[in-house]
């Protein structure tokens, strides 16, 4: 996976010239990202990359994601934070992620989802390039997806609120 990630980063930097921030979502991956990804990048690619040397807060991540052109992550938390920040995403997920990955499909963003075990760096770059070159359209897709999220949340909260007012089935009430 990391070899594929390095190849994707190389394509991105070479073709777009845009910088990359490598920021692991999990504290235990900070050293791995530096040693197995950043340090092994070819020098011209590494010069366009910044590797976080510490774990960051959710607020820091959300600020960076809001200012980013694209967030690519194998972890769903970063995908959710990026979308909430109105930033397009690519999610090459692990099969072990289970049904979490279906969120992108349900939001109409299934083409931004791939199986990390079966996507090539070139396929991932092609998807990233599509977002990059059609950035306003990609952001529009994120806006529409987030409207669906808000509508679903509003429905769920209205249902919960009505259950609190009338009582739960069988007389049960939350503690």
Image (tube, rainbow, N blue to C red):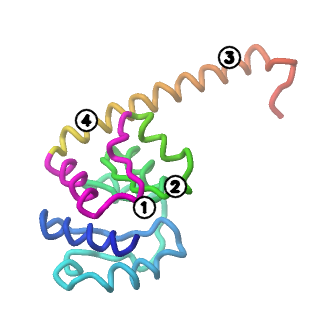
Tell me residue 163's x, y (percent).
72, 19
Residue assigned mark 2? 95
At 39% from the left and 29% from the top, the residue drawn is 147
Of the two numbered discs 3 and 2 in the rendering, the one whose residue sits closer to the viewer: 2
At 48% from the left and 72% from the top, the residue drawn is 55
Q: Is residue 12 left or right of residue 35?
A: left
Label 1 residue SS: loop
Q: Of marks 1 and 3, which one's residue comes earlier in the chain?
A: 1
165 to 142, vertically: above or below: above
Q: Of marks 4 and 1, which one's residue comes earlier in the chain?
A: 1
Q: Of marks 2 and 4, which one's residue comes earlier in the chain?
A: 2
Q: Which residues are magenta?
A: 108-133
Label 4 residue SS: helix
Of the two numbered discs 4 and 3 in the rendering, the one whose residue sits closer to the viewer: 4
- Residue 138 is drawn in which quadrant? top left
Q: Bin the neighbour count of mark 2 within 10 Å (Cα to Cα): few under 14, some 14-19, many 20 and up.
A: few
- As measured in the structure, the alpha-carbon distance from the residue carrying label 2 to the one carrying label 4 is 28 Å
The quadrant of the image that shows the N terminus is: bottom left
Q: Of marks 3 and 2, which one's residue comes earlier in the chain?
A: 2
Residue assigned mark 4? 140
Residue assigned mark 1? 117
Picture disc at residue 162? 3
């Amino acid at each position: 996976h990391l070899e594929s990630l390095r190849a994707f980063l190389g394509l991105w930097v070479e073709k777009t010239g845009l910088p990359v921030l490598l920021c692991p979502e999990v504290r235990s991956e900070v050293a791995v990202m530096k040693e197995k990804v950043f340090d092994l990048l070819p020098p011209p690619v590494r010069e366009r990359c910044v590797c976080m040397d510490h774990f960051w807060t959710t607020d820091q991540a959300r600020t960076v994601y809001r200012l980013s052109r694209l967030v690519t992550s194998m972890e769903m938390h970063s995908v959710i934070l990026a979308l909430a920040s109105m930033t397009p995403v690519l999610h090459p997920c692990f099969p072990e992620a289970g049904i979490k990955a279906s969120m992108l499909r349900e939001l109409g963003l299934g083409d931004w989802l791939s199986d990390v075990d079966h996507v090539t760096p070139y396929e991932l770059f092609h998807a990233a390039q599509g977002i990059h070159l059609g950035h306003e359209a990609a952001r529009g897709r994120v806006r529409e997806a987030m409207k669906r999220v808000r509508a679903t949340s509003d429905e769920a909260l209205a249902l919960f609120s009505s259950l609190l007012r009338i009582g739960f089935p069988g007389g049960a009430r939350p503690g």
